[in-house]
Image: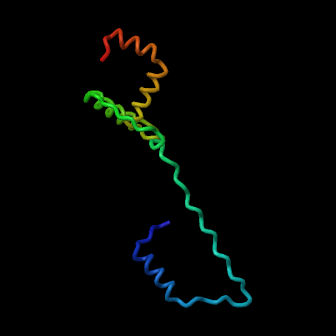
Amino acid sequence: MKRKRLAELVREEAGALEAPPQEASPKEEPQAPAPAEAPKERPTPKYLTYVRKECRLRPDQLDALTALARKLNRERKGGERITENTLIRIAIDYLLNHSNHVLKTFYKTGGS
């Protein structure tokens, strides 16, 4: 459906107000107005379902995250956009699922 300009809509409404109402002939039954379509509700964006938590990153970490997100977005075949926050959530899920191994490695290397 082509979008109309505001001026066109105003002209149509003004024309409808100036035109005399048409009376239905006795043989014809007045048609019931078509039921207006209920406005479709947009689903809540996925990122708004998450709890906000801030984190400080080193500049090299942020640069690497940005580069990886761009690379993955170029290679993807549709679906959700991949952001730095998406990658951070993936890393957190991985850490939580493999915390014993990750923490042992972290402490053996001296942590960084």
Query: For residue 94, which quarter of the picture?
Result: top left
Above or below, 20 relative to 64: below
The one of 24 and 46 positioned closer to us in this rendering? 46
- x and y percentages locating residue 24 in the rendered image: 67, 88
Q: Is residue 24 visible?
A: yes
Above or below, 3 relative to 71: below
Q: Residue at x 35, y 8 (%)?
A: 108
Q: Quadrant of the C terminus?
A: top left
- x and y percentages locating residue 12 in the rendered image: 47, 80
Q: Residue at x 25, y 30 (%)?
A: 59
Left or right? Give the position of 37 relative to 72.
right
Number of numbered discs visible in the structure rendering: 0
Residue that lies at the very extreme toward the left in this rendered image? 59
Q: Is residue 78 visible?
A: no
Residue that lies at the very extreme toward the top in this rendered image? 108
Q: Residue at x 44, y 38 (%)?
A: 51
Left or right? Give the position of 35 relative to 26.
left
Query: For residue 85, which quarter of the picture?
Result: top left
- x and y percentages locating residue 37 in the rendered image: 59, 64
The one of 102 and 26 positioned closer to us in this rendering? 102
Query: For residue 47, which quarter of the picture?
Result: top left
The one of 2 and 30 positioned closer to us in this rendering? 30
Q: Residue at x 40, y 11 (%)?
A: 104
